[in-house]
Amino acid sequence: MSTGFIVWDVDPVIFTLGPMQVRYYGLLFAMGFLIGYYIVRYFFQKEKAPLAEIDKMALYIILGSIIGARLGHVIFYEPEEYLKDPIQIFMIWKGGLASHGGAIGLAIGLWLYSRKSWNKSVLHIMDRIAVPTALASSFIRLGNLFNSEIYGFQTDLPWGFIFVRDGQTIPHHPTQIYESLGYLIIFIVLFIMYNHRKGIINRGLLVGWLFTLVFVLRFFVEFIKNVQVDFEKNMTLDMGQWLSIPFVMIGILLIIRSKKLGPAPVVAVGSTPKAKK
């Protein structure tokens, strides 16, 4: 076995203030939202869209993604455990967020927001959010690394990590880093696509590519990742892979359909837009 592995024994808590703990995961999670806010602001400025809408949209994004991620974990991975003690559903600080649920919650949140926004096209809005979502996903996976969780199978590759705080004594694939780097590359690709088209994007194109690339990556990384719950051990494909398939299919359909839909028409503030898709 290679001796070039990395002993990972980083404390997930940055500092403590009385009963409150500040963790790398929470910090990275917040950074994803904060940087995403300024990326969307850049898009709005470029398109001369009303900046006041960003703050309204942010509430839907934060609530939708967090509630969706939590319920996704509860429903898809451990429904029996949470049915025994439903109050645990609200204890998010104990961990248990599912990215597939977060994607569903985010989409629902943006759909609800679009009904009251200056631009009624939910796909137009989702395309702008798709870009920073990929970056936020990269930060969240780094948070998982600091928590020493969601890592892969044993490996003798020189970059294998020994997750000491999770009781490991042998190196494993740092799948958190694989996914984080993959999502970062996807962010760069989507950002370049947006700038190359100068913000004139066929509705559904960017979010279609986001779903396709992110969940194809997730599907294949799952082959070397440890299962999250015991019932997955007897499955041909684990829960993460089964949940990724519909997102990939939806992503491909959105890419194909985007050519037909074309860009959303320019909407003046206070007017009634015609685009409703």
Image (cartoon, rainbow, N blue to C red):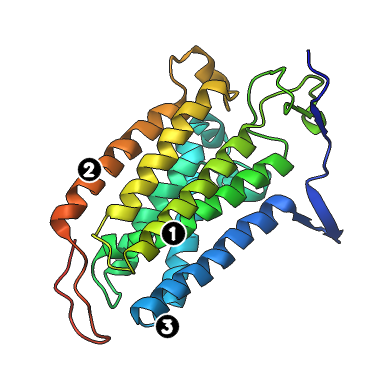
User: Can you say whether 171 is above or below 192 in the image?
Assistant: above
Q: Which residue is mark 3?
A: 52
Q: Nearer the viewer, mark 1 or mark 3?
A: 1
> Of the residues shown, which amino acid type is indicated by label 2?
Leu
Question: Residue 106: which quarter of the image?
Answer: bottom left
| Left or right: 128, with 82 as reference point | left
Q: Nearer the viewer, mark 2 or mark 1?
A: 1
Residue 136 rendering spot, x and y as whole percentages: 54, 54
Q: What secondary structure is marked by label 2? A: helix
User: Can you say whether 216 is above or below 95 in the image?
Assistant: above
Residue occupying image coordinates x 35% and y 82%: 48
Query: Tag 3 or tag 1, which sits nearer the N-term?
Result: 3
Q: Which residue is mark 2?
A: 253
User: Can you say whether 202 is above or below 81 in the image?
Assistant: below
Residue 95 rendering spot, x and y as whole percentages: 64, 43
Whether residue 243 is visible here, answered yes or no, is yes
Whether residue 130 is visible here, answered yes or no, is no
> Of the residues shown, which amino acid type is indicated by label 1?
Phe
Q: Which residue is mark 1?
A: 191
Could you tell me which quadrant the C terminus lies in? Answer: bottom left
Q: Nearer the viewer, mark 3 or mark 2?
A: 2
Q: What secondary structure is marked by label 3? A: helix
Residue occupying image coordinates x 84% and y 57%: 15
Q: Quick check: marks 2 and 1 in contact, CB under 8 Å?
A: no
| Left or right: 253, with 227 as reference point | left
| Left or right: 27, with 8 as reference point | left
Q: CA distance from mark 3 to mark 2?
A: 32 Å
> Of the residues shown, which amino acid type is indicated by label 3?
Ala
Question: Residue 265: which quarter of the image?
Answer: bottom left
Of residue 172 and residue 188, the one placed in the foreground of this image is 188
Q: Residues within 10 Å of mark 3 (few under 14, many from 20)?
A: few
